[in-house]
Image (cartoon, helix red, strand yellow):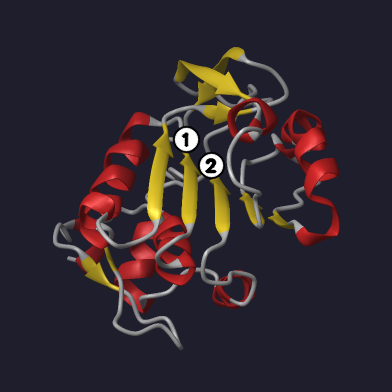
């Protein structure tokens, strides 16, 4: 039986340049992210390298579409004491593992980066939306119905980044992986972008079909 189908212990990651290593709780079953972490110990090597090179100690980092917390845990390690991470994840199953991974890698946030988990979706307005779930790929949940697909949908709260983060410390990096919702997310953070100017870095997925 492939190891990812029954793997329930935290998975040690093997990310170049990161020591001591992080570990993450993953989904059992054939979920692409979880399977890859079990087999290789790293997810998206190129994006991981760019992400790591974009964070300085003390930075405030935003992780939109945090999933189980791979980039959240990386950001917390790299931002270090004095830094902050805001992780956004609306799916309850992903959210449960995200919270476990924050607790595992930043126990009590004592002396480490402050990690705040937001159980919401990010959009262009404060309200509610339907999250359409992919039963086989927990990184492919979407805030819209996909043509030709039948998906179970949950009602989830939505927020804008500006409304939530305007009164906090300046944001240094925003990572967005939201399966096509980026076109809604950017209008909801335009004031945040304007206030921070060229010092704010954004790493975002560009997926024409989803957009």
156 sits left or right of 104 in the view: right
Q: Quadrant of residue 136?
A: top left
95 sits left or right of 2 in the view: right
Crowding around mark 2 (Cα neighbors within 10 Å: few <14, some 14 to 19, many 20+) is some
Comparing 147 with 51, the one in front is 51
Query: Residue 32 has which mark?
Result: none
x then y, percent, for residue 140:
53, 42
Q: Is residue 28 visible?
A: no
Comparing 118 with 170, the one in front is 170
37 sits left or right of 211 in the view: left
Q: Residue at x 37, y 78 (%)?
A: 40
Instruction: Give the residue pinned by disc 2.
Output: 140
Separation of residues labelled 2 and 1 (CA atoms)? 6 Å
x then y, percent, for residue 185:
72, 34
Q: Secondary structure at mark 1?
A: loop
Q: Is residue 174 visible?
A: yes
The answer to whether mark 2 and mark 1 are in CB contact below 8 A is yes
Q: Residue at x 25, y 57 (%)?
A: 110
Query: Split into 4 quadrants, where in the image is the N terminus?
Result: bottom left
Query: Split into 4 quadrants, where in the image is the C terminus?
Result: top right
x then y, percent, for residue 14:
36, 81
Q: Residue at x 21, y 56 (%)?
A: 107
Decide which of tag 2 and tag 1 comes sooner along the chain.
Answer: 1
Q: Quadrant of residue 81?
A: bottom left
Q: Secondary structure at mark 2?
A: loop
Comparing 132 with 30, the one in front is 132
Q: Residue at x 75, y 49 (%)?
A: 207
Query: Residue 134 has which mark?
Result: 1
Comparing 174 with 79, the one in front is 79
Crowding around mark 1 (Cα neighbors within 10 Å: few <14, some 14 to 19, many 20+) is some
């Amino acid at each position: 039986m492939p190891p990812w189908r029954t793997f329930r212990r935290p998975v040690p990651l093997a990310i170049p340049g990161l020591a001591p290593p992080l570990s993450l709780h993953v989904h059992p079953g054939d979920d692409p992210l979880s399977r890859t972490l079990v087999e290789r110990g790293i997810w998206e090597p190129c994006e991981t390298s760019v992400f790591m090179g974009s964070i300085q100690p003390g930075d405030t980092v935003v992780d939109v579409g945090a999933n189980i917390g791979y980039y959240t845990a990386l950001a917390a390690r790299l931002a270090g004491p004095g830094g902050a991470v805001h992780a956004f994840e609306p799916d309850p199953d992903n959210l449960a593992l995200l919270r476990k991974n924050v607790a595992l890698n930043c126990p009590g946030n004592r002396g480490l980066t402050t990690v705040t988990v937001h159980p919401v979706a990010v959009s262009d307005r404060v309200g509610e939306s339907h999250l359409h779930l992919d039963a086989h790929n927990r990184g492919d949940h979407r805030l819209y119905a996909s043509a030709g697909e039948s998906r179970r949908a949950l009602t989830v709260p939505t927020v804008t980044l500006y409304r939530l983060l305007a009164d906090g410390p300046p944001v240094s990096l925003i990572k967005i992986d939201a399966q096509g919702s980026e076109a809604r997310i950017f209008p909801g953070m335009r004031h945040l972008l304007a206030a921070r100017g060229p010092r704010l870095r954004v790493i975002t997925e560009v997926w024409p079909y989803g957009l």
